[in-house]
Amino acid sequence: MTTNWTSTLSVSSHPRDNLGLGYVYAVASRRSGGISVGINVNPNKACNYRCLYCQVEGLTRGKAPALDLKRLKAELKAFLVDASRAQRSVEPCSIRDIAISGDGEPTSLEAFDELVLALREALFESGLLGRVNVVLITNGTLVRRARVQKGLAVLATIRGEVWFKLDAASNEGIALIHDARVSPWRLYENLKVASSLCSTWAHTLCFRLDGTALLDVPREREAYLAFLGRAQKEGLPLGGVVLYTLARPSLQPEAPRLSAVSEAWLQALASDVHGLGLDVRVHS
Ligand code: SF4
């Protein structure tokens, strides 16, 4: 481990192996305006979704492989101690957040709770506990698992936040965008569980497929707003909703059919969501 790791970072490219480590990587993040440290527990590029916009090359169906806890702990401790020193000495190198996010669905890791506990331990030992935010980027489908719930409860103690994917709220929309059979009812129940355990924001990626955005289809927009309206009405403790569009090209076969929506389009949807009484952030 050296202290010049920031020289390998770029906002336009997010290679997972830029540090030469197995689990830990770092990116210069436009979203956070600084260094985002990532933890990738899906080196096998396995996910239970196949989103049309997924940027994972060679994505396969499946789950994360068994966790090498010893290696994860060693990498986290070595990297965070190093990064913590940089954070104190070189301002542009500031760590903005730590993202549990990689080449697949992180909560498909059997030992998800051990991952979060190891992160808490490393944050404590590096002096970063409570000084950086931790985000879990998830499709939210596996929240019923006891070890995922245990992990979310620990995440809540380390300035954690769940970014829960919500691109569509109909059976057809979910099947179209994620190539998966998950009912909106199940997603809602999962969102309810996640938000009861840890601060949770719904994240909606909006894009056009063959020129049409899913949420421009009246029944899809209605279903999406009804889903969020129900969450608001039933008092789910949601932080709010983040709306964003494509920033980097998809690496799925459908890539040529996809395009970004405009800032004005996102703002119009934001206005509808805001009308439900929810906080909205737009990242274009
Ligand atoms: S949930 Fe994430 S990793 Fe899985 S297919 Fe979708 S974008 Fe890719």
Image (cartoon, rainbow, N blue to C red):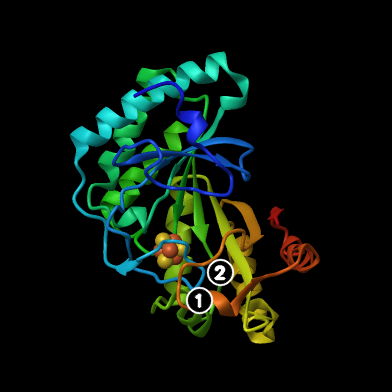
Query: In this rendering, which labeled residue sits more in front, label 2 or label 1?
Result: 1
Disc 2 to disc 1, how far (Cα)? 8 Å
Q: Is residue 231 left or right of residue 38?
A: right
Q: Position of residue 215 (x, y in %)?
A: 66, 77
Determine whether 62 is above or below 242 in the image: below
The residue under the point 35% across, 66% down is: 58
Determine whether 128 is above or below 112 in the image: above
**Residue 146 shows up from this direction:** yes
Q: Position of residue 63 (x, y in %)?
A: 26, 61
Q: Are marks 2 and 1 in contact (CB under 8 Å)?
A: yes
Mark 2: C-beta under 8 Å from nearest atom of ligand 1: no
Q: Name the residue that disc number 2 marks.
A: 167
Q: Is residue 117 left or right of residue 259?
A: left
Furthest toward the top, the residue is 89
Q: Amino acid at mark 1?
A: Ile
First in sequence: mark 2 vs mark 1 = 2
Under circle 2, the secondary element is loop
Q: Is residue 67 left or right of residue 80?
A: left
The residue under the point 18% across, 50% down is: 66
Q: Quadrant of ligand 1?
A: bottom left
In depth, the one of 174 and 40 nearer the eye is: 40
Q: Name the residue that disc number 1 marks.
A: 177
In depth, the one of 227 and 61 nearer the eye is: 61
Determine whether 4 is above or below 254 in the image: above
Under circle 1, the secondary element is helix
Q: Which mark is residue 89?
A: none
Q: Position of residue 270 (x, y in %)?
A: 74, 62
The residue under the point 27% across, 66% down is: 62
The residue under the point 29% across, 33% down is: 118
Q: Position of residue 43 (x, y in %)?
A: 29, 52
Q: Is residue 15 left or right of residue 10?
A: left
Mark 1: C-beta under 8 Å from nearest atom of ligand 1: no
